Amino acid sequence: MNTRSRVRTGALALSLALLAAACTSGGSGGVKGTPGAAGLRDPYFPKQGNGGYDVRHYALTLSYDPASGRLDGRAEITAEATQDLSAFNLDLAGLTVRDATVDGAPAAVNRAGNELTLRPGEEIDDGAEFRAVIRYSGRPETVTDSDGSKEGWLKTADGALALGQPNGSMAWFPGNHHPSDKAAYDVTVTVPAGLTALSNGVRTAERKEADGRTTSVWHTAEPMASYLAMLAIGRFDTTTATLPGKARVPVLSAVDPQVAAKTAALRARVPEILEWEAENFGPYPFAAAGVVVERDGDVGYALETQTRPVFPAGSFDTGTLVHELAHQWYGDSVTPATWADLWLNEGFATYAQWLYEEDFAHTPAERSFAKAYEDEDAWAYSPAKPPGAEDLFGAPVYQRGAMVLHRIRQEVGDDTFFEILAGWPAKHRNATASTEDFIAYVDAMTDEDLTDVWDVWLYGDGKPPRPAGSSD
């Protein structure tokens, strides 16, 4: 090797060393950011959600044509970085991304399955607020869950219905689709003449466009998990009312005209049932309320979408209405930290049905407990540890979850139990909470030893002996 070659080699080594130092330094111009995680490792949906940021607000501007099935969307996402970010992911199923910007500058876009990766031109500092805008279009997908139910974008005879538990919201807008990341929403929807678009929260505007289409604007101020976002497009009859009390919460309910007559009486009782629930669970937690009732062929289940639950007409009965409205406190206002905590939603909502029957149907909760105890399906697994995602909505989560609450009532007495019932959603209002949080909260509310409730009834395997003194 000649001298000239050694000089070139030494110069190259020095250049590489300086570059490495620049890349690892925290100084100006140094590369310090890393990509946010593509998934939050939820115990049942490990790829759901994304790391590195918290969403503060979604502004969705949508246009839908039922004839072609085409959705055009613009999602403006305001978020705060929780690390130095060189790139970050959003969940999006199907649809075609036209372009994206971050803080007004073009961002590189990459798709891999349901993962949409944005790489901004400049890194985002930890703690910085940023705004991503994604323009997209296409025919949204219907998602089939592991238990066979349909969600995502459901085409109906006169429009569409968008529902998101547990994965479907990614079928119609990009986002951080895990219940732990709640945000405020503004949804603007334009639909053909003669159709109505309904979403969560308060309708702040409705206008006719020059081409005859109708645009509706909906505002949800309180943080909402994306699986609770909904969109209903079609022909609806609407009614309005107001909840009693100082807040004067507006109640807007909508129904497909074909099932309007047979559901009218129960729809009129929504304010009354919410008032009863507020007496037991604490003040109603949101700025709007109501229901959407569809034809049976449009959706196969009821869902507690925030402020405005959705029902097929065949499931629109008093018990189901009490259940889904109770979710406004248990599941919507205080939301599970992971899907393993779903029993906190369903156990409470099922127990709300037991309480309603206790007050109005002369059926003590003790009798409902006894009936659930005899249901062998309820003992298939622990409500806090379903074996798989397909088991999340099984009888143990609902019925045995409610039995756990009744066992707490039996141990601590009615006075303390009803304090727990109202205090839990008050403590975690507009936030998320885990099973561990609930156990700690209840244990702090009583001097009773609840080890048996937690170890045997909540987490235990198999059917325990019926509690002494318990009868139907």
Image: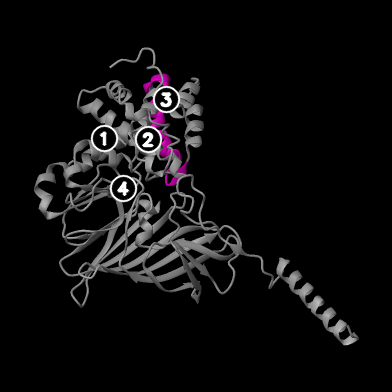
| Magenta stretch prevailing secondary structure | helix
The mark closer to the camera, 1 or 3, is 3
Q: Secondary structure at mark 1?
A: helix
Q: Give the spatial CA distance, label 3 vs label 2.
A: 14 Å
Q: Secondary structure at mark 2?
A: helix
Q: In the rendering, at what x and y percent does residue 15 appear?
A: 78, 78
Task: Residue at 49%, 75% (x, y): give it.
Answer: 104
> In the rendered view, does 333 fall on the left or right side of 196?
right
Can you tell which mark lies on residue 397? 2
Q: Give the spatial CA distance, label 1 vs label 3.
A: 35 Å
Task: Residue at 45%, 45% (x, y): give it.
Answer: 44
Mark toward the start of the polypeptide (1 vs 4): 4
Answer yes or no: is residue 186 visible: yes
Q: Nearer the viewer, residue 225 or 220?
A: 225
Residue located beneath label 4 in the image: 148
User: The disc labelled 1 sits on which kind of residue?
Assistant: Trp
> In the rendered view, does 202 fall on the left or right side of 362?
right
